[in-house]
Image: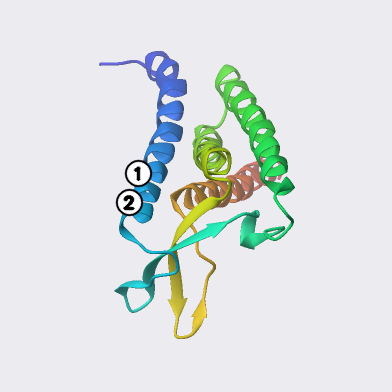
Amino acid sequence: MPNANSARSQLPWLLWGVSVLVIALDLITKYLALAKLEYLEVAPVTPFFYLTLRFNEGAAFSFLAGAGGWQRWLFSGLAIAVGVVLIAWIMRIYRQKGNTLEAFALALILGGAIGNLYDRIVHGHVVDFIVLHYGAKEWPAFNIADSGICIGAALLILDMFKGHKKATATHE
């Protein structure tokens, strides 16, 4: 039976595996979207979800999408910087035997950042293909990398509240 120390020593590999899984799923699904969908084609999946092929030259919600091309390198540089910070943060958590939920959330964000970085460098834009909608109201198109980033961010927020609750309980 593995002890807590051996499980703990496997943690970095599991976290890197989470990041690699997000990257792999992102690249595979983007490849399929590029191969199977025409640009702006709508392929209904459910009454609230469809697939479409869209290209985002900007950041979240197409921020700076029409800026002329320089934003590709700005966002690529930012993604590299954020990736380095996330790797250091994950390693710090591991070395200090810190919070695994926090590290898992960061691994999801890291995988998403690398998935979208790949697109920016290779294609010059991020490939988006998932759209959720209600009637005529739509959420902006996104991809698996974006999902990893959003789920990771939500887990970080949850972890912050969980940590705050613990800190409050110990001070009472």
Q: Is 168 displayed left or right of 14 in the figure?
A: right
Residue 97's x, y, as percent? 55, 21
Q: Residue 32 carries which label?
A: 2
Label 1 secondary element: helix
Label 2, residues with CA under 10 Å away: few <14, some 14-19, many ≥20 = few
Q: Which residue lies furthest to the bottom in this view?
A: 135
Q: Which residue lies furthest to the left in this view?
A: 1
Q: Mark 1 points at which residue?
A: 28
Q: Give me the residue at 64% from left, 27% from top.
A: 84
- How many discs mark residues in the rendered view? 2
Q: Give me the residue at 65% from left, 53% from top.
A: 59
Query: In front here: 18 or 64?
Result: 64
Q: Which mark is residue 6?
A: none
Label 1, residues with CA under 10 Å away: few <14, some 14-19, many ≥20 = few
Q: Give me the residue at 55% from left, 32% from top.
A: 99
Please state, as top left, top right, bottom left or bottom right, where the C terminus lies in the image: top right
Q: Which amino acid does label 2 sit on?
A: Leu
Q: Which amino acid does label 1 sit on?
A: Ile
Q: Give me the residue at 52% from left, 71% from top.
A: 139
Label 2 secondary element: helix
Residue 44's x, y, as percent? 32, 73
Q: Is 5 displayed left or right of 106 in the figure?
A: left
Q: Is 6 displayed left or right of 163 in the figure?
A: left
Here the colouring is: rainbow
Between the residue at mark 2 and the residue at mark 1, the CA separation in whole angstroms equals: 6 Å
* Res. 1 image quadrant: top left
Residue 50's x, y, as percent? 37, 70
Query: In front here: 156 or 54?
Result: 54
Q: Given contact means CB atoms under 8 Å apart, are the residues at marks 2 and 1 in contact?
A: yes
Residue 89's x, y, as percent? 63, 28
* Res. 171 image quadrant: top right
